[in-house]
Image (tube, rainbow, N blue to C red):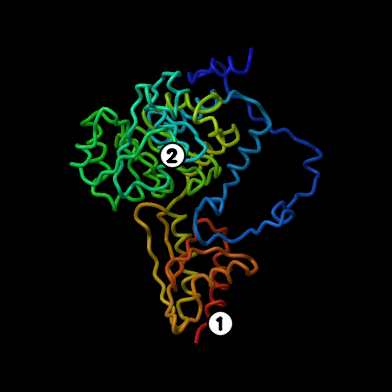
Amino acid sequence: MKRRDLLKGLSIAPLAGTVATLLPFKSSAASNAKKRNLFKELGVRTFINAAGTYTFMTGSLMHEEVVDAIRSASHDFCLLDELQDKVGEKIAAMTKAEAAVVTSGAFSGMTLGLAGILTGMDEKKVEQLPHLEGTGMKTEVICQKAHDIGYNHALTNTGCKIIQVETAEDVERAINEKTALMHFLNIEADKGKIMHEEWVALGKKHTIPTSIDIAADVPPISNLWRFNEMGFHFVVISGGKAIRGPQSAGLLMGKKEVIAAARLSMPPRGSTIGRGFKVNKEEILGMYVALEHYLTYDHDKEWKEWEARVATIEGAVKPIAGITTEVKVPTLGNVTPTLHITWDASKVKITTKDLQEQLRIGEPSIEVVGNEESHISITTWVMKPGEEKIVAKRLKEELSKVCV
């Protein structure tokens, strides 16, 4: 069978058989080889992450259970669709969604979710995206002005355009026969005039699907199912942040018909706008195990550990003359104890940029968030145990030597 014919024949329906048993393949050569430090070999700087789960800092670190799953999965073949079927069923049950699929991140989930809404199960339409003219597909996505950020490029990748609104009345006026979706950005919820429940209600009133981006918005753990239960047609989240799955993975959750249609634009199918959003068997199983681990973890204990780490750093710098500290917890995204350190520039003679650079070039290297002048912020939730003591010592050293 030709590859093109094989791809056209692929279906997202559950496939016969079961996923291959994941038996580790042991190589005596590999097991006896000395472990390589590839970062050192390549001259790539590693650092203590006191900043957070930023993509450019490679997100978070995977738990050993996740790494074990990835390593184990690499030794066997399986059918990609069958694996997505089985894992999707498990993830949907865990997140109280009708259906779910592992994607190559939240961004790809947004593109795929909207693609599914635009095409339904029509394979001809799937191949026409992102060319909407003359196809009969809808072309507009309604979004609150405060929620229209750069990541919404994931939506315009389908060929749709964003229609900005600010009030419920604006939504009523904007809805027309071209409206495909109403999109919501959770992390900017407090900057818009329409909240989650009202947004979903407006969509239901006009039979318009609704979606929500919660990329970095766990904790709290309840966000994993809150928006599915609220009635959004699809929800996207990053896998490589607090869940600590593969950085290149994420979840698309939502209504069965939306997820089924979205998968028509996903690999292994070709000739689709989602072909580049490939997610391999190792990432799928890694994401599954990461979510499983996250849901069974003692989050109260973890929170206390974060607070203790923050307290260690705060205790080291607070006594320095001219230093002010405050611990805040963001309300919508990256919800973790965050230490804000500010200083009186007349007493502490260093700029934010210079302090960041001194921490960066030290040994070990440390990354912190630089805010406005004379202000940095620090999170400890992606640190390894004990790293908070190093950060505390280095900050105290750098701030003390410029204190007058």
Q: Nearer the viewer, mark 2 or mark 1?
A: 2
Residue type of the residue flagged with mark 2: Ala
Q: Which residue of the protein is positioned furthest toward the bottom in this rendering? A: 404
- Disc 2, SS: helix
Q: Which residue of the protein is positioned furthest toward the left in this rendering? A: 169
Residue found at x 53% / y 34%? 277
Residue type of the residue flagged with mark 1: Lys
Q: Is residue 291 above or below residue 119?
A: below
Q: Tell me where residue 21 appears, x and y as whole percent.
A: 63, 26
Kindly identify which residue carries mark 2.
154
Label 1: how many residues lie within 10 Å, few (<14), some (14-19) or many (20+)?
A: few
- Disc 1, SS: loop
Q: Tell me where residue 170 appears, x and y as whole percent.
A: 21, 42
Tell me the quadrant of the picture where the N terminus can be found: top right
Residue found at x 39% / y 22%? 120
Q: Which residue of the protein is positioned furthest toward the top in this rendering? A: 1
Residue found at x 30% / y 34%? 231
Q: Tell me where residue 9 appears, x and y as whole percent.
A: 54, 15
In this rendering, position of residue 331 left or right of residue 365? left
The front one of 97 and 238 is: 238
Residue found at x 46% / y 68%? 376
Residue 35's tag is none
Q: Tell me where residue 136 appears, x and y as whole percent.
A: 34, 22
Kindly identify which residue carries mark 1.
401
Sooner in the amino-acid sequence: mark 2 or mark 1 = 2
**In which quarter of the view is residue 340 placed?**
bottom left
Distance, label 2 to label 1, CA atoms, is 47 Å
